[in-house]
Image (cartoon, rainbow, N blue to C red):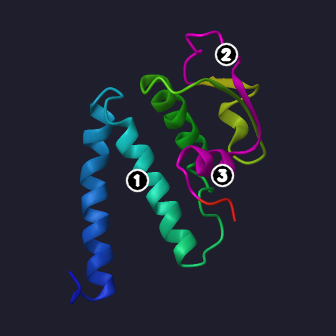
């Protein structure tokens, strides 16, 4: 693909993602991690290109919903997230992400914006 012009590469990417969307949606949650990963990767690309809004934008509410399901299915240690600002319409109050610790360890707490929460869960740099 190194020899492809950028417009051809972007067209190929768009065709692939357009075809993947219905398959991911029909999987009943089993491929939500793939959807979240693709959303995070798009943030990586926006950040690499120096564009504003990496890990943010109109899809943030959907990404946070995917994160909620993925954290639960992967049995990640529970964090209660109070997401502020953009992307909050889906969450009117703090929401638990993940599952309670079997040892009774208290849940972690997060209070901040959605893009930072996505960065933390995806192990992306904060600066």
- In x, y percent, where is residue 31? 32, 36
Q: Report the side of 5 relative to 37 (left or right).
A: left
- In x, y percent, where is residue 8? 26, 81
Q: Are marks 2 and 3 in contact (CB under 8 Å)?
A: no
Q: Is residue 114 magenta?
A: yes
Q: Report the side of 123 relative to 117 (left or right).
A: left
Earlier in the chain: of badge 2 and badge 1, it is 1
**Mark 2 to mark 1 CA distance (whole Å):** 32 Å
Earlier in the chain: of badge 2 and badge 3, it is 2
Q: Which mark is residue 38?
A: 1
Residue at image location 30% in from the left, 55% down from the top: 18
Q: Which residues are magenta?
A: 98-124
- In x, y percent, where is residue 94? 74, 26
Q: Are marks 2 and 1 in contact (CB under 8 Å)?
A: no
**In the rendered image, the vertical position of residue 125 relative to residue 77, given as above or below:** below
Residue at image location 25% in from the left, 60% down from the top: 16
Q: Report the side of 79 relative to 70 (left or right).
A: right
Q: Secondary structure at mark 2?
A: loop
């Amino acid at each position: 693909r190194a020899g492809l012009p950028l417009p051809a590469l972007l067209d190929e990417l768009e065709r692939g993602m357009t075809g993947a969307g219905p398959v991911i949606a029909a999987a009943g949650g089993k491929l939500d991690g793939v959807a979240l990963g693709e959303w995070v990767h798009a943030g990586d690309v926006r950040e690499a290109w120096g564009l504003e809004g990496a890990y943010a934008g109109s899809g943030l509410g959907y990404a946070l919903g995917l994160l909620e399901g993925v954290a639960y299915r992967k049995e990640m240690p529970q964090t209660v997230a109070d997401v502020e600002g953009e992307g909050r319409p889906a969450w009117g109050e703090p929401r638990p992400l993940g599952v309670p610790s079997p040892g009774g360890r208290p849940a972690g707490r997060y209070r901040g914006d959605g893009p930072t929460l996505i960065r933390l869960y995806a192990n992306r740099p904060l600066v």
